Amino acid sequence: MSTLETWKTIKVGTGLKTKDDFMRAFEKGGFAITGKAIKMFERAELSVSPAPAVVELVQITTTQLTGEPNGSTKPVVFAAASRMGLKHCTLEIAL
């Protein structure tokens, strides 16, 4: 892992196993699911961790990753993140 400070620590694989589980949890919490959120739930690659795990999240800008102040392409950003030991967040983590 990089030397970046942890922004937030979350737990995954804690009981929500399906898309419907996530939707019910949001609705139970009083959150409306609309627009882009619905499209995220419809994506086939939404999967969940089969076992509980702790994930440390960091915040970093494109400029910090690539050194380019005006942005960069997705492949360049992902390659730079990989070199720093960072991994792409799954949709489960993004939710």
Image: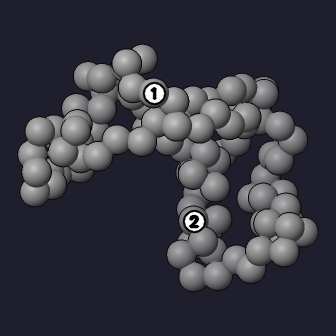
Above or below residue 81? Residue 27 is below
Residue 55, position as x, y percentages in the image: 62, 30
Residue furthest to the right: 28
Q: Quadrant of the N terminus?
A: top left
Above or below residue 60? Residue 51 is above
Left or right: 16 in relation to 74: right
At horizontal 73% and vertical 34% (from top left) the residue drawn is 11
Decide which of tag 2 and tag 1 comes sooner along the chain. 1
Residue 40 shows in the view: yes
Write down the quadrant of residue 43 in the picture: bottom right
Residue matched to label 2: 40
SS state under label 1? loop
Q: Nearer the viewer, residue 16 or 46?
A: 16
Distance (Cα) linking label 2 and label 1:
28 Å
Residue 75 shows in the view: no
The type of colouring in the image is one colour
SS state under label 2? helix
Above or below residue 60? Residue 73 is below
Q: Residues within 10 Å of mark 1 (few under 14, many from 20)?
A: few
Q: Quadrant of the C terminus?
A: bottom right
Q: Tag 2: residue type?
A: Met
Residue 71, position as x, y percentages in the image: 15, 54
Residue 15, position as x, y percentages in the image: 87, 41
At horizontal 9% and vertical 46% (from top left) the residue drawn is 68
At horizontal 77% and vertical 74% (from top left) the residue drawn is 31
Of badges 2 and 1, nearer the viewer stands: 1
Residue matched to label 1: 5
